[in-house]
Image (cartoon, coloured by chain):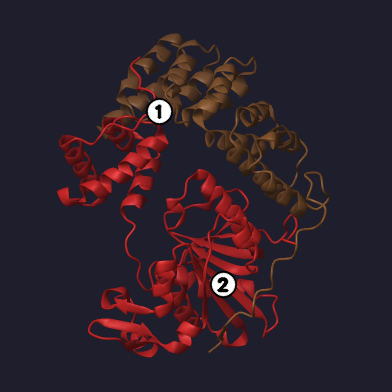
């Protein structure tokens, strides 16, 4: 039979006709629309996926997207294409899951006054950890009973600096109720808002490379880890190592929150999926093979 | 405000004088030992051998992750025999691990294990091959469909071919129908593949 040429070279470039065909397909299947101006953006991601799949022509890749029964590759490709700037209360249902279900389970056998540690891994410019903080303060009715440490990290020092600064454009705040904007932000110039000092001061921002064992060995054990829409940038081995690191960094019974289209079961068999009313999240078993020394 | 700053993190405890061992009594120490061996190709045989006795899932995962990171011919060679394991969790983890290794390193073992006398091992090899990003993938699957004497191996290869999403696999599937004309599962599977491609076209 005819088969693909060896995958030891770069995949063939994307012709104008192939780009048009790909865009038509994406529009029909997903509603995503890409103009000619987005060609480089799309082609870069297409090339990465063709290499990962060992395919040499865009036509072959389009066939895979069209006909693969599981749709797994289409999902993967779409994830890469839809990584947008983040915003406050993104994937709100996961924050609801945190304050309505997960934390209640975390503190079930824990006396009042004890410490709870939450980590926003890959926090980018800070919208996620600040959203977690606001959700805790506003919607978790036991927040005053515990001391809560909120850590946030990223590998990119520039976004960390912006997170510490805590200044955001109005569009980042569009899903926050106005009352919460008034309570937790102050105006910082036309169309810009800054997180109040108390909230900024309550989050530990730090520079962490998730797959550097030396960097992660120094961090404390956590009850909850948020790592949403970050691991899609990792290759298979990177995802394995990151999930192993989460396992090490969690207390027994601790939870991991991933992005809505990510699944821990594709990365590691060590976690148990837990279905709560608001979301599915992943739990380190309570009985485990030894805690981190 | 109940949110508090963390107390300063104490410096990481110094590494124990004795390096962690893969046969330590404590799973956490075995896990650390496996992680420490991740960049050491010479450790592949020891890591592969430990898998046969390792009962803790987190240590097993650390060993397999270390072997992906090593990614040498020794690492692949040490993993393929576990396709014959009775432990389904181990077998599946090995398949997933080998699929993440460099395809050219894995390819010679795929070739060899497609001829294994155990049809179950051949099924697992086909499943593995189906998700390997290697130029020979289609040939391996086509060869299984056209030559393997066991229908279940052929059906596993059929599934792999359909999953590639390439309509040009349909003539190969038809040859499977010719080989097993009285097998209703083959007929159903080939018809289903036709329907799937027609629906997606």
Task: Residue A67 in the image: state x and y as whole percent.
Answer: 32, 34
Q: Quick check: do tags 1 and 2 share a chain?
A: yes
Task: Residue A176 in the image: state x and y as whole percent.
Answer: 34, 79
Q: Residue at x 57, y 82 (%)?
A: B5
Chain letter for the red colouring in the rendering = A
Residue A259 vs B45, above or below: the answer is: below
Residue A118, which numbered label? 2
- Residue A124 visible: no
Q: Quadrant of residue A179?
A: bottom left
Chain letter for the brown colouring in the rendering = B
Q: Residues within 10 Å of mark 1 (few under 14, many from 20)?
A: few
- Residue B6 visible: yes
Residue A109 vs A288, above or below: the answer is: below
Left or right: residue A196 versus residue A30 is: right
Left or right: residue A207 versus residue A181 is: right
Q: Which residue is nearer to you in this view: A241 or B165?
A: A241
Task: Residue B171 in the image: state x and y as whole percent.
Answer: 34, 16
Q: Quadrant of residue A219?
A: bottom right
Task: Residue A30 in the image: state x and y as whole percent.
Answer: 27, 50
Q: Residue at x 61, y 19 (%)?
A: B119
Sequence-wise first label, 1 or 2: 1
Question: Badge 1 is on which residue?
Answer: A8
């Amino acid at each position: 039979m005819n088969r693909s040429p060896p995958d030891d070279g770069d995949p063939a470039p994307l012709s104008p006709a192939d780009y048009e065909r790909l865009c038509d397909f994406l529009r029909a299947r997903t509603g995503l629309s890409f103009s000619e101006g987005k060609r480089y953006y799309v082609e870069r991601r297409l090339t990465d996926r063709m290499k990962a799949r060992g395919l040499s022509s865009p036509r072959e890749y389009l066939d895979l997207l069209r006909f693969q029964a599981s749709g797994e590759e289409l999902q993967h490709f779409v994830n890469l294409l839809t990584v947008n700037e983040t915003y406050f209360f993104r994937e709100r249902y996961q924050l609801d899951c945190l304050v309505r279900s997960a934390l209640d389970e975390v503190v079930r056998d824990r006396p009042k006054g004890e410490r709870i540690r939450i980590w926003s891994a890959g926090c980018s410019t800070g919208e996620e950890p600040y959203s977690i903080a606001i959700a805790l303060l506003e919607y978790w009715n036991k927040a005053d009973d515990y001391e809560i440490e909120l850590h946030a990290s990223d590998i990119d020092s520039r976004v960390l600096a912006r997170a510490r600064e805590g200044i955001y454009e109005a569009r980042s705040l569009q899903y926050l109720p106005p009352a919460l904007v008034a309570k937790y932000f102050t105006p910082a110039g036309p169309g810009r808002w800054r997180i109040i000092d108390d909230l900024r001061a309550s989050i530990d921002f730090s520079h962490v490379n998730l797959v550097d064992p030396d960097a992660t060995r120094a961090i404390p054990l956590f009850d909850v880890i948020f790592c949403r829409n970050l691991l899609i940038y990792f290759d298979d081995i990177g995802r394995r190592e990151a999930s192993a690191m989460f396992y090490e960094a969690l207390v027994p019974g601790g939870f991991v929150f991933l992005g809505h289209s990510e699944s821990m079961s594709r990365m590691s068999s060590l976690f148990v999926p837990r279905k709560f009313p608001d979301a599915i999240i992943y739990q380190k078993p309570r009985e485990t093979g030894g805690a981190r020394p | 405000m109940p949110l508090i700053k963390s107390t300063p993190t104490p410096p990481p405890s110094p590494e124990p004088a004795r390096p962690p061992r893969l046969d330590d009594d404590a799973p956490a120490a075995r896990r650390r030992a496996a992680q420490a061996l991740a960049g050491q190709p010479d450790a592949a045989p020891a890591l592969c051998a430990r898998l046969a006795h390792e009962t803790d899932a987190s240590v097993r995962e650390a060993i397999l992750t270390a072997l992906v990171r090593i990614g040498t011919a020794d690492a692949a060679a040490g993993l393929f025999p576990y396709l014959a394991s009775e432990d389904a969790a181990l077998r599946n983890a090995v398949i997933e691990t080998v699929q993440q290794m460099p395809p050219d390193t894995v390819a010679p073992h795929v070739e060899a294990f497609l001829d294994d006398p155990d049809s179950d091992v051949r099924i697992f090899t086909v499943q593995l091959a189906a998700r390997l990003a290697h130029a020979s993938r289609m040939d391996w699957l086509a060869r299984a469909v056209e030559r393997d004497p066991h229908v279940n191996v052929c059906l596993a290869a059929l599934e792999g071919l359909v999953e590639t999403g390439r309509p040009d696999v349909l003539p190969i599937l038809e040859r499977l129908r010719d080989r097993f004309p009285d097998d209703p599962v083959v007929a159903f599977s080939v018809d289903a593949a036709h329907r799937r491609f027609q629906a997606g076209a």
